[in-house]
Image (cartoon, rainbow, N blue to C red):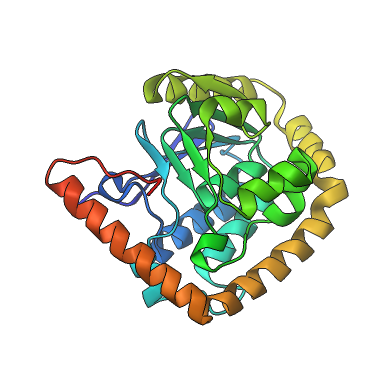
Amino acid sequence: MNEPITIDLSAGLLTLGLNRPDKLNALTNAMYSSLAEALFDAAENPDVKVVLLTGGEHAFTSGNDLEDFLRVPPTDLDSPAFRFMASVIELEKPLIAAVCGAAIGIGMTLLLHCDYVAVSRNAKLRMPFVSLGLCPEFGATLLLPRLLGRARAAGLLLLGETLDGTKAVAWGFANEVLEDGAQCLAVARQQASRFLALPPDALRQTKQLLKRADFQQLQDTLRQENLLFIARLGSAEAQQALGTALSRSTSKLGKAASGERPNPQQ
């Protein structure tokens, strides 16, 4: 049986792979826990110099696995998804993402915390929190307006608008757009090699300085978002919207099993 999270450490590069291709790498509580543990360990392991996150050539992640999410929702600030967020924002080593195909929900907000993002041209980045009766997470309500301005941030967070790979680079979500998934992964690894060639303490301290001005405010925002996210999950509109989304997701996966490729935009 394939592991849903693959972990490989080679020559200073820790590669964390999302490995549920049949589910478009949808994230379960167990996957969040594995990722958080790997990143907290990476922070303390002197053999880890750089971290690369990838979902393979066809999908980064379609966000939360709704069936798992509704069965065991986050109920406190130590829940697996929130621990994963903490492990990312506390990481002082370079974090690279190779984003091919779907990057939905946390798959998009995660990119706000990466130091280099390679994205395929056919990538689809979207944050459908409001349409699911929820609120944004991972500090997006703080970081997005600063990155994009309020108007663009509102379009993404309130209306759930989609960015393709080209627009993701133009809007500052990603560093480089590549023609396909194979090229995206190759360039992400090339950039990892560039980071690996640099003095690690200088990298770490420079990343600390880049984050210093916003760090306390980010932690405060993260706490407020997460508490509201937990409360929103119990609302009638969220339960209805999530139930509908789960039914649609199940239908799409059934079509995929019969030979039709699921569309994460629906």
Return the residue found at the far right. Answer: 213
Inspect this view and state whether residue 38 appears: yes
Question: Looking at the image, which residue is at 57% across and 39% down?
Answer: 48
The residue lying toward the viewer, choosing from 28 and 253, is 253
Q: Is residue 180 above or below residue 237?
A: above
Question: Looking at the image, which residue is at 25% across and 47% down?
Answer: 22
Question: Looking at the image, which residue is at 52% across and 46% down?
Answer: 126
**Quadrant of res 207:** top right
Q: Position of residue 86 (x, y in %)?
A: 64, 59
**Quadrant of res 169:** top right
Question: Looking at the image, which residue is at 36% across and 30% down?
Answer: 57
The residue lying toward the viewer, choosing from 88 and 159, is 159
Give the number of marks: 0
Q: Is residue 246 above or below residue 101?
A: below
Q: Position of residue 101 (x, y in %)?
A: 41, 35
Left-right relation of 266 to 119: left
**Quadrant of res 67:** bottom left
Q: Position of residue 229 (x, y in %)?
A: 60, 71
